Image (cartoon, coloured by chain):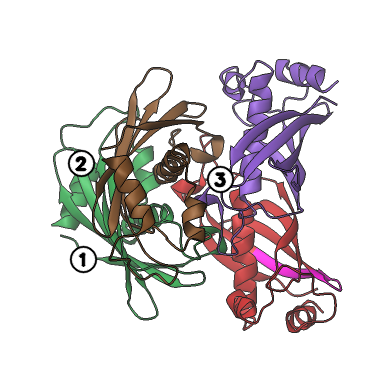
Chain colours: A brown, B red, C green, D purple
Amino acid sequence: MSSEHPFTTRVRYGDTDCMGVAYYANYLYWFEVGRTEFCRAHGKSYADWEEAGIFLPVVEARCRYKHPARYEDEITIYTRVGEVKASSVVFEYRIERTSDGKPLASGWTRHAFVDGSGKLLKGDNPMRRWIAELGA
Amino acid sequence: MSSEHPFTTRVRYGDTDCMGVAYYANYLYWFEVGRTEFCRAHGKSYADWEEAGIFLPVVEARCRYKHPARYEDEITIYTRVGEVKASSVVFEYRIERTSDGKPLASGWTRHAFVDGSGKLLKGDNPMRRWIAELGA
Amino acid sequence: MSSEHPFTTRVRYGDTDCMGVAYYANYLYWFEVGRTEFCRAHGKSYADWEEAGIFLPVVEARCRYKHPARYEDEITIYTRVGEVKASSVVFEYRIERTSDGKPLASGWTRHAFVDGSGKLLKGDNPMRRWIAELGA
Amino acid sequence: MSSEHPFTTRVRYGDTDCMGVAYYANYLYWFEVGRTEFCRAHGKSYADWEEAGIFLPVVEARCRYKHPARYEDEITIYTRVGEVKASSVVFEYRIERTSDGKPLASGWTRHAFVDGSGKLLKGDNPMRRWIAELGA
């Protein structure tokens, strides 16, 4: 498994709901932020891969909600690479309240390697190799 | 000006914010719903136009917020065509609480006619003609 | 298990992303729409429960993405009650493309029964009873 | 008028739409980010005011879209205080692509000063004074 990459952001008004806490779907957005910044921190932007014709649509997502994030909370998204299979990769996430390290949520997303037409890349591909090395 | 087309939807948890009301950016989403359903009600889907190579990016948007929409409120979006110029069209919107007709918001969006490469369509085009007739 | 309740909505421009398909976090929003409309179809609005001091924060969510939903697609969200435990309930969802029944996604959310202060309702409560009957 | 406060963020997948650019409603979200960070940079969080019983619901918003923001673009939101009236304040925004200063959008939002029950604060209030000084 790779080491975790931290990225910090803040809960905005638009992220909250009328229960006074961050709306549950936004955690998947924050997971996206986490994996994008993980890639960038390791020298590759996700856009680079798309230009090279390799896409990573999500095929499954899971999130456990532990403690609500509130308006103005600074949160830290920790991202690492999980299992890398022949044609898929898992990213794993933990979200903490930055001020005190309170765990807010954890989860993972599984992504397929596909080409521009949506066809599964079954053999090896440069992005898979790159991610597998990071996750080793 | 065209007659108004009504479309009804409902305020969801995910649309609200921690002030307990619908978040202000969501009204622009509802404006989009309004103009799409306006087009559909008049026999054309916006996707049809895109397939024909005509796009309508928004170049300006304005919204006045009159009364907050709350969770579970059913709202009605009234849409009509406003001014049609050589290379732009205005859609106008009113949003009411369905139960009692309370005005919640009003606004407009102005859209340019462009081709697939983003170039302004300066002469006439089929979508402009179609909209101009509706707005007459 | 309860029978499934269908609810139909449409993919909007604002729901899509630059891969040309519905953004993955929006499925959790559609799950919310599904469970709200499930409750309403059975005679209770979720807002009623909140007024009675019973809240259902989500504690876990899972979604499998099978086929992308695209702009203008009409989708049907099928919702039913899954497992009802002492202090939690599971809602299960399937989302289909309405036109041809193509499965787009499936998933579930697990919710705790809590009071207005966020404290777990460990004993029985009226919402739990109501849902358990629906799910029987 | 106050000097502009810059704040930098990035366009995410979830912010884009199937035209390949940032969805138009997200600019209002970025305006919120701008005015929140403007307040924080000047020593006050918006949450502080809410705790003091002063709220600033938006009563009007306007945005002009000049050039599309794309996935992965870093954008800078410049925010300043505009006109401060007896019971309202205007925030003004410009959004630029950070890499080359390309103007992407500009706009403003007008906010009322209200108390916790939504009643307009007609006389002076501490937040109005604070903002008026910043805007002077």
**Callout 1 environment at 10 Å: few (<14), some (14 to 19), or many (20+)?**
few
Q: Which mark is residue C3?
A: 1
Whether callout 1 and callout 2 share a subunit is answered: yes
Q: CA distance from mark 1 to mark 2?
A: 19 Å
Q: How many marks?
A: 3
Q: CA distance from mark 3 to mark 2?
A: 28 Å
Q: Which amino acid type is marked by label 3?
A: Ala
Q: CA distance from mark 1 to mark 3?
A: 31 Å
Q: In the rendered image, which residue does mark 2 sit on?
A: C88
The chain containing the residue under callout 2 comes to C
The chain containing the residue under callout 1 comes to C
Task: Please check the rendered image and state whether residue A112 is part of the magenta-colored stretch, yes or no.
Answer: no
Residue D123 at x, y percent in the picture: 78, 20
Residue C51 at x, y percent in the picture: 38, 38
Q: Which amino acid type is marked by label 1?
A: Ser
Relative to A18, say whether D54 is above or below. Answer: above
Task: Please check the rendered image and state whether residue B79 is part of the magenta-colored stretch, yes or no.
Answer: yes
**Callout 2 environment at 10 Å: few (<14), some (14 to 19), or many (20+)?**
many
Residue A120 at x, y percent in the picture: 32, 67
Q: In the rendered image, which residue does mark 3 sit on?
A: B22
Whether callout 1 and callout 3 share a subunit is answered: no
The magenta stretch is: B78-88
Please state which of residues A103 and C136 is positioned toward the viewer in this rendering: A103
Residue B53 at x, y percent in the picture: 66, 78
Q: Which amino acid type is marked by label 2?
A: Ser
Does the image show residue A34? Answer: yes
